[in-house]
Amino acid sequence: MEKQNRPGLLRRLAAIVYDTCLVLPLVMLVIALATGLQIAITGEQGELDYSATLHPLIVQLLALCSVSLFFGYFWRLKGQTLGMQAWRIKLRVIDGSELSYWQVLLRCLGAALSLAAAGAGYWWCLFDRNGRCWHDYLSGTELELLPKRA
């Protein structure tokens, strides 16, 4: 695919911001439900001493799973999250096959790595001759800019 058919960095970031606004409430809901479940099982109320809070590693794991399931669901369903739909971006596998669960996992982990490296994995698309980010290469996927609707 030609570089002109790729979404630019600003369009990608706009879709990320849009999806973040959707996925954060989901993460908060999952953590709240897990905390409620812990209170129901242990019977601890923990008003001011916060004894009923979840262990930080459990919170991080729940957040990671929630985010991965959110993106994985939408990517496997239509190749687009809601933010990607709004910004006319579509995820596709380079060889034209169906996106696998393994590729979803690799893409999620790669995107986290791209972000953790001070965003270098995202900035990479500005200099890459194919307009792809690190997580695109890692997962064997690419983003396509869809044409405007009539």
Image (cartoon, rainbow, N blue to C red):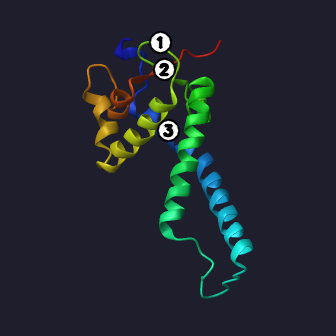
User: Cα distance, mark 3 to mark 1?
Assistant: 26 Å
Judge depth for marks 3 and 2 and give the one in front: 2
The residue under label 3 is which amino acid type?
Ala
Q: Quadrant of the N terminus?
A: top left
Judge depth for marks 3 and 1 and give the one in front: 1
- For mark 1, what is the residue? 96
The residue under label 2 is which amino acid type?
Arg
Q: Which of pointers 3 and 1 lies earlier in the amino acid sequence? A: 3
Taking 20 as reference, is 8 left or right? left
- For mark 3, what is the residue? 14
Which quarter of the figure has residue 35? bottom right
- For mark 2, what is the residue? 92
- Check whether the beta carbons of the residues at disc 2 and disc 1 lie within 8 A of each other: yes
The residue under label 1 is which amino acid type?
Gly
Residue 28's x, y, as percent?
63, 59
Element carrying mark 1: loop
Total labels: the figure holds 3
Q: Quadrant of the C terminus?
A: top right
